[in-house]
Image: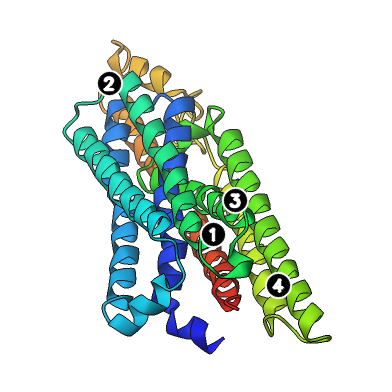
Amino acid sequence: MDLVYLQLPLVFFTAAAPMASGAFIGLAIAFLTTRFSAETLRRIDRWTLLPLVILAVGVIAAVAFMNTSQSALLVIQGIDPGAFGFAVFMAVAFAVVALVYWIVAMVGRLSDGARKAFATVVAVLAVVYSVAIAAAYMMSDVPLWASIIVPLGFAGFSLASGVPLGMLMLAAARALPEARETRFGTAALVTALVGAVVSILAITVQLMNAQATVAAIFPGADAVPGAWVYLIVSIAGFVVALACMRGALSGPRSGRSAAPLGSTAGAAAMPWNSVDSAAASPAAEGNVVPDLEARYRRQAATDATKAVPYLVLGNVAVLAALVAARVLFYAMQF
């Protein structure tokens, strides 16, 4: 395990890269299921910088770790140059395409159809990028890494961690109430659940293979001391993340008020368009309805951000799950 602790910056990168890139999977699901207002889209586009920053931090950590010849040799020793080159190429390709998407979206040059198509392309590249990282390890001379289960696990990581991060971006942008009214919640939960199941399966199979290999040579020996603790932590992290996603999706919708806001009969549960129509009617003289509308919008904005704490907790939990799984992964270097 001492070797693992020396590689903690790399452990963080292999956890942060699938998570940050996978956030665009969550965004693609949102755009494919929900038609957001122009104002909401502007807020979402501003928050799209978040996964790009997380990815940059992960890359900086990896580059800093490989800054010395000893660390670089430790990482690339036994790795196929072609597979390593493909991983680097996909890292650059994903970063460029994701950055271009963010810039074009920020300047307001994306139509609804173009946004859906562009976000879907970035989401697909996110999965390919995660698999490319795993392929570099799979093509190494470490026997326990030379398995198709490694790329499968990384693909699962991008779904299980990326979708919660994408949902956090929507909540921070006050877009979640609009998304709750569509199939977004079901699609996001199913996608994250599939990713979590695949991730847990991959790390469990790899751990069992490691134990069987060691036991065949040294009967009764443990492949990775304390490995089951890390496995339980990773499973618990995925479960907590899914539970937080479910809790965030159970909040109020955008169409109706969550509580009575005025004394005017029937105004407590008015849909958005009813409030707007009432404010424009001749009977709405004075400040009664405009004040009600202002209070309603303030309450709706507050409700829209109530899911943020749930999703922050969920993202912290899933990051802990990824780090625990990565620690196991790097511990199997024999």
Instruction: Name the residue tied to disc 2.
Output: 111
Give whichever of 294, 7 is nearer the camera.
7
Q: Marks 1 and 2: in contact by CB < 8 Å?
A: no
Mark 1 or mark 3: which comes first in sequence? 1
Mark 2 or mark 1: which comes first in sequence? 2
Q: Marks 3 and 1: in contact by CB < 8 Å?
A: no
Instruction: Name the residue tied to disc 3.
Output: 152
Q: Picture quarter containing residue 85?
A: bottom left
Q: Pinpoint residue 67: horizontal percent, then vertical percent.
A: 26, 77
Label 3 is placed on what type of residue?
Leu
Instruction: Name the residue tied to disc 1.
Output: 138
Q: Pinpoint residue 157: horizontal percent, then vertical percent.
A: 54, 54
Label disc, if present, on residue 272 of the rendered structure:
none
Q: Picture quarter containing residue 190?
A: top right
Quarter occupied by the N terminus = bottom right
Mark 3 or mark 4: which comes first in sequence? 3
Label 2 is placed on what type of residue?
Ser
Q: Pinpoint residue 138: horizontal percent, then vertical percent.
A: 54, 59
Any part of residue 321 in sight: yes
**Secondary element type, mark 1:** helix
Give the spatial CA distance, label 3 vs label 4.
17 Å
Label disc, if present, on residue 210 of the rendered structure:
4
Label 1 is placed on what type of residue?
Met
Q: Marks 1 and 4: in contact by CB < 8 Å?
A: no
Give the spatial CA distance, label 4 vs label 1.
15 Å
Label 4 is placed on what type of residue?
Ala
Mark 2 or mark 4: which comes first in sequence? 2
